Amino acid sequence: MPTNAIGELFPGRGEQDINGPAVSIVRGPMEEPRVVGPAAVSVPLGATGSAGQIAVQTAKLLGANKIIAAGRNKDRLADLSSLGATDTVLMDGASGSGDLSRQASDVDVVIDDLWGETTAAAMLVVVSNRTDPGRLLSWIEIGSVAGPTAAIPSAALRAARLQIVGSGQGSVSTRTS
């Protein structure tokens, strides 16, 4: 993503701010070839938080044609269309899982700021309901707001072509060239 495009997210901020670790953690893995592009469908989990909002905006700037923002705060979810979300899913227990399975089953990338039990449940719902299990699903883990560990059922790993990628300060290069 060109620096001036990411700069649109943070007007008036310096080069160091818009290329800093917080933005790079979200942006870096999304820029990998074929992860997010013009035909991509993206789901930021935890979209109502700061990292989730950056994920919504970054997916939009990278050209995702559908961005399904998922979170627990109903009021904040309503505001995410102004940042680029095309759809929202309220993550409120059983009904949230049903909505997620209907809307997000054929996504290309999930940007996950939650982890924990929430991720384990969401991952199982998404991979179990894919119409084309052979289509790559990149699950990018950027935070652990809901818990430091996730007991991912082995069935989820075998049910679809799933790639789990971690993104944090240790996975972002500090080199400038």
Image: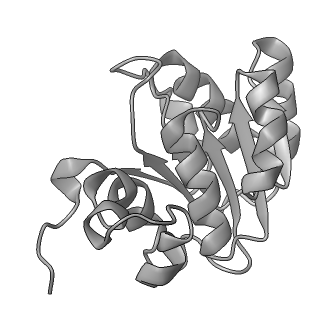
Q: Percent from the top left, x then y, of residue 116?
A: 45, 20
Q: Is residue 44 above or below residue 31?
A: above
Q: Nearer the viewer, residue 23 or 65?
A: 23
Q: Is residue 94 above or below residue 107?
A: above
**Image point (67%, 43%), residue name:** 127
Residue 171 figure quarter: bottom left
Q: Nearer the viewer, residue 101 or 7?
A: 7
* Left or right: 147 as drawn, with respect to 101: left
* Left or right: 128 as drawn, with respect to 20: right
* Left or right: 48 as drawn, with respect to 165: right
Q: Nearer the viewer, residue 67 or 99?
A: 67
* Left or right: 26 as drawn, with respect to 91: left
Q: Nearer the viewer, residue 57 or 63?
A: 57
Tell which residue pokes out farthest to the left in this image: 175
Q: Is residue 22 above or below residue 2?
A: above
* Residue 109 visible, this orientation: yes
Q: Is residue 169 above or below residue 155?
A: below
**Image point (42%, 23%), residue name:** 150
Q: How many marks?
A: 0
**Image point (43%, 20%), residue name:** 151
Q: Percent from the top left, x then y, of residue 57?
A: 62, 59
Q: Percent from the top left, x then y, of residue 76?
A: 74, 30
Q: Percent from the top left, x then y, of residue 162?
A: 52, 53
Looking at the rendering, in which quadrant would you find the C terminus?
bottom left
How is colour applied across the structure in the image? one colour
* Residue 100 visible, this orientation: no
Tell which residue pokes out farthest to the front in this image: 12
Residue 96 figure quarter: top right
**Image point (49%, 28%), residue name:** 114
